[in-house]
Amino acid sequence: MPIGPAQSAPSKATEKTNAGATQASSVKLSSQVQSLGGQASSGAVFDAKKVDEIKLAISDGQFQVNSEKVADGLLQTVKDLLHPAKS
């Protein structure tokens, strides 16, 4: 019997997704990542007041980017990626 617009056969992608949904996965975070999570919840990494100030400056058109600071940070990141610290 032909399949009409109201009736559609499941696609192969849907079948694969449904088959994969029955498999269990587990993820284990390293102690380093776990410690970062603790810092974020204590507010050490995220300053909501500073974020609000930046949002306001952006919406008012007053936010200015220090391109030298951005470039220095980018260069430092590249250096860190090319020569990771040995621990």
Image (cartoon, rainbow, N blue to C red):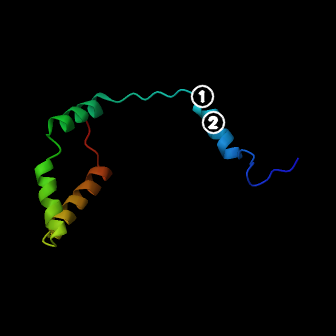
Q: Residue 37: where, in percent of width, then height?
A: 25, 34
At label 2, counting other C-alpha atoms closer than 10 Å, the crowd grade (few under 14, some 14-19, many 20 or more) is few
Amino acid beneath label 1: Thr
Looking at the image, which residue is at 23% across and 31% down? 35
Amino acid beneath label 2: Asn
Check disc 1 and report its element: helix, strand or loop.
Answer: loop
Label 2 – label 1 distance at C-alpha:
7 Å
The residue furthest front is: 6
For disc 1, the marked residue is 22
Q: Residue 38: where, in percent of width, then height?
A: 21, 32
Q: Quadrant of residue 56?
A: bottom left
Q: Are marks 2 and 1 in contact (CB under 8 Å)?
A: yes
At label 1, counting other C-alpha atoms closer than 10 Å, the crowd grade (few under 14, some 14-19, many 20 or more) is few
Q: Quadrant of the C terminus?
A: top left
The residue furthest bottom is: 61
Q: Is residue 73 left or right of residue 53?
A: right
Looking at the picture, does residue 29 appear above or below residue 9? above
Looking at the picture, does residue 21 appear above or below residue 49? above
For disc 2, the marked residue is 18
Front residue (pair 2, 33): 2
